[in-house]
Structures are given as C-alpha cells and as structure tokens.
Image (cartoon, grey):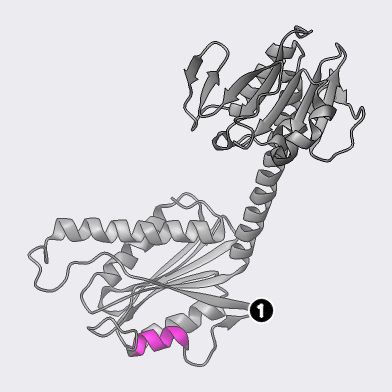
Amino acid sequence: MADDTKKYLVKIGDECGASIGDINKVLQSCNEIRPFDGDKKSNVYNKYKSEQEVVITLLNNTKEVRNIIDEIKDSNIIVYTGNVVDDTHIEGYSHIEITKSIKWREDNKTVNKDEKTFDFLKYIIQILSDICNVGLMQGYEANNREKVGKKTDKREDNEEESKDEVTKLQRNKYIICDYGDADTGKSNTLMEVIKLLNRSIHITYRNITNLSDGDEYAQFTVNSNVKVSVCTQGDPRSDHPKKLVESINAGMDVIVCAARDDRNGAMNEKTVNQVYEPENTTLTQGSAQYIKIWYRNFFIAQGDPGRGNRALEDIMCSTSAKGIVELIEHLMGVRIL
C-alpha cells in the first residue's frame, strides 16, 4: 500500500505518445483495481481504487483541474498529460514528470530514454505500480495482447485479401509482348524463354516448331494446367498473326510474342497492331479477356561501343528471358524455374 504521507502528481509529456485514454484502457484491464466513482460529479476525470484502497485519478481535462480539486483530493496518484498544470502545486503531492527523459523532481534524477524504441506506456504503468504498490503490469500485458491479437487478425485479413487478389490474377489470360526496334534482341530473348521452359522439370507438355529464318514457335503446359505459348518472330510477316491466332484458339493462358515498333519507340508498327487485333479473331477466348503486358528486353543502342559484344548481349538476353518467366510464375501462381 502507498505511504499515506506520500501522494503524487504525475505529468506525462505530450511527446511520449501515451495518452490518458491509453492508461485508462490498461487500468480497465487490471484485476487488482476497479473503477471508483465516489462522489464524482464531473466528466473531467476517471478514478480507480485498488483492493489496498489506493486511489488513482486520471485527468481527462486539465483545464478544469482547479474546479474539481475537492473531488480528487482523496487520490494517492493524480495523472495528467500536457503542460496546463505545470505550475499547479496541490498541497501534499510530490511531482513526477515523464517526458522524453524521465525526471523525478523530488530527488532531481533524470533517466534519458530513446523515444524511438522505448515503450513509454509500459514504463508509465511500471512507475504507477511501484509508487502505489499495486500490480498494474498484468493489465498492461492483457491490453498489449489484445492489441497484438487485433494486429494479427488484421494481418490475416490482409493475407486473405492478398490471396484473393492472386487468385484473380490467375483467372486472367495474358499476352506478354516484347517490343522494340529491329535488331535489339527481341527474338534472341524469346529463344531463351523457350530454352528455360523446355529445361524446366515442371513442364508436363512441350511442342517446339521451327519457323522460317531460324525462329521458333512453342507450346508448353506447366504442372498439367497452365498453357503457355512462345513465338520468337517479331517482324511484320505472315507467320506472326497466324501464330497469335493459333495460340488464342488453343486456349493458351499466357502468350509470349514479339513486336516491332518504330525507331522513336512508338508502338504503331504492323506487328504491334497484330497483337491488338490478330486477324480473324478477337483477343477473347471464352469469357477470359487477354490482358496485354508490354515488355522491353535489355539492349544496347545503335552506335554504342558495347554494340556487338556477344558475351554482354548473351547476358542481357538470358536476364531478360528470366524476367519474363518469373512474371509468368507470379501471374499464374506456378513454379517454373
């Protein structure tokens, strides 16, 4: 039980981030203390009493403290925030100030704390527990567990929402188009995509066809349920729209292709338009609308001294191809690499 000759006026600085409302919640969670109205006539404060008859009063509005002094003078501890009653000296009360540093005015002690990592609310409750000899920390722990539980529930809700969003992605169909000027590595990049898919242990079906000028068209099935096609052609020739149509009619979930743009980067060349509207079909297969994702592989511009460096170009092609395959993994929720 608190020393009857010692009463405390405890100020909590606004910068601590621990409000009177926070402390109220902790005290309401304590088994060893209960709300105590007494002769309460005002909404300016909340009063609690322990089994040892220790009375703690929390001031909700310090501006009116002088008007309710008679109602709270039975308190062993009076707690308030802000600086309104800094100069208020209630007879018989020792002052404790809790700011970014902890200052015990009665013996002039100062304990510096790092406000970024220090739990001021916990420290405040510990101070109150010590000076009134009441076990308030179990109220703090109970209140803290409730907060953690709410955070966990919210995190689980967010995880469920995230799963739902991923599921929605997997219901879509996609055209991934590597576009760019001539001789910038589009076809070589997509050849690497075919190699990565062909080597994967997760591929349950594969069919690779040689086209003119060394290009390839391939169809794969990943884990028996995700269908992916790749066509390395990007020049405005007849095979390009035919393979787009073939892929759509085959019900491919992901179509990877190339398309030529003009030298200013504008996507207005013939092969780009073919991606938008393949001949004799629309970009719709059943009820699934193909979402078009535009992609540019790494390349070295004309006139750059690195142009023609085969080792560098091979690295750029393989890295670009890996990016496309990883995108497919994320979009369709499958493992390939």
Instruction: From the top left corner, tell me how far across and down residue 135 is, in percent.
Output: 76, 14
Instruction: Residue 277: give x, y in percent of width and height.
Output: 47, 89
Counting other residues with Cα less than 10 Å from the Cα at mark 1, is it few (<14), some (14-19), or many (20 or more)? few
- Residue at the bottom extreme, as displayed: 280
Placement of 282 over or under 292, stated as above or below: below
Q: Is mark 1 on a helix, strand or loop?
A: loop
Whether 317 is among the magenta residues is: no
Horizontal placement of 190 versus 2: left or right? left
What amino acid does circle 1 point to?
Ser
Q: Nearer the viewer, residue 182 or 2?
A: 2
Report x, y in % for residue 337. Answer: 43, 50
Taking the image as shown, residue 174 lies to the left or right of residue 128, namely left
Identified at 12% across, 66% down, the residue is 307
Name the magenta segment's main secondary structure.
helix
Q: How many labels does the image show?
A: 1
> Does any portion of residue 4 appear in the rendered image?
yes
Q: Give the range drawn in magenta.
A: 270-276
Quadrant of the rendered image containing residue 76:
top right
Residue at horizontal 59 percent and vertical 64 percent from the top: 169
Who is closer to the viewer here, 11 or 124? 11
Residue indicated by mark 1: 287
Left or right? Give the position of 215 relative to 4.
Answer: left
Q: Quadrant of residue 197?
A: bottom left
Residue 121 visible, this angle: no
Please name whichever residue, 180 or 44, is drawn nearer the observer in this view of the structure: 44
